[in-house]
Image (tube, rainbow, N blue to C red):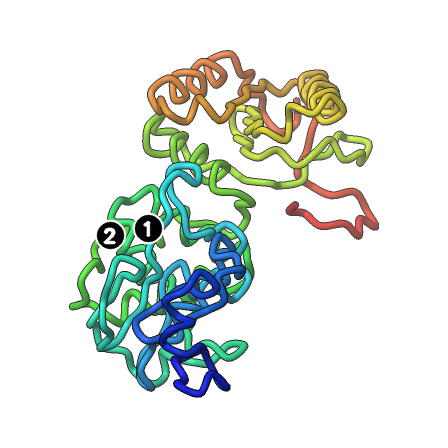
Amino acid sequence: MRLDPAGVSGPTPKQARGPGWRQCAHGWYVPACVDQEVVEQRIMEQAARLPSHGAVTAWASLRWRGAAFFDGTEQGGRIVLPVPLVGNIRSDDRVQVSKAQLAPEDREVIDGVACATATRALFDEMVRRKRLLPAVIAVDMAVAAGLVSIDDITTYVHTRPAWTGVPLCRKAVVLAIDHSRSPQESRMRLIWILDAELPPPLCNRAVFNLDGRLLGYPDLFDPIAGVVGEYAGADHRDPDRHRADVVREELFRDHGLECFTVVGEDMLNHRRVAERMLSARRRAKFLPPESCAWTLEPPPGWTGSLFR
């Protein structure tokens, strides 16, 4: 709300200076009891300052559209990011303002908030992240949320050859895929490709035995060598989940597949993870298709998904 000397449509100046209200943006106030830790609340509060031609963009636009992994933080939640806005807007430490042009077709209103389109927001987010691996993860997660396709963002990038950040974005869209389900899965895949320098793997692809039984959907699968890679996040520490993981790994091994697992702490050392991947591949059997006890071909009448 804006200030209202009568105290009808907003707090009076005196009330706004008291403990019952807090300023969320220049000229805008919310009751102090409103939880500003909720990321959607932060986005909405900063969107209030937008001019008629401005928009929320980058991670904030993607989050407002429902993309869960864009939570407005970095380093495991230790750093809270300013809300990215595009337009001629008064800046402070609560927002990151871009003065870049925003074409009318790149702006739309979603649930009352002016947002950059998903493709424009993803482009801005890749540029904001500055480095290749985080930029690829941004594309993977926007695709996983169903907001864009790889073709959508690739076309968008290639039709803006002179924009700041385009070289990075071109590299990122080439490495992005349709079937990653978490940032850490994407990170593991990129270590496999960029650090271990191995051929691109399949991700979350159904693997069957020769009788048509589903063995599982490995996070990472190398069908040439016969290697399964799994990321075990914090949720895998639950006893039931851990037990299921062990059973599944045994099932993969029983069918001639070599396995390796990566946990969260491992991601701090890409070289160590790459060495584990290379070691698993050296142990793999590299069997020809006719000698494998597994297959990527679904059994007749299969109605399930080929990707998790």
Where disc 1 sits, the SS reads: helix
Q: Is residue 57 left or right of residue 265?
A: left
Q: Is residue 79 left or right of residue 277?
A: left
Q: Amino acid at mark 2?
A: Leu
Q: Hey, which quadrant is residue 221 in on the image?
A: top right
**Residue 45 x %, y %:** 43, 68
**Residue 159 x %, y %:** 27, 72
Q: Is residue 91 left or right of residue 112?
A: left
**Residue 132 x %, y %:** 29, 44
**Relative to the observer, which residue lies in front, 133 or 221?**
133
Question: Looking at the rendering, in which quadrant would you find the N terminus?
Answer: bottom left
State whether residue 232 is above or below residue 71. Answer: above
Rendered residue at 79%/42% (across/down): 299
Q: Can residue 116 be spotted in the picture?
A: no
Q: Amino acid at mark 1?
A: Ala
Residue 168 numbered mark, or none:
2
Q: Which residue is mark 1?
A: 172
**Residue 57 x %, y %:** 36, 67
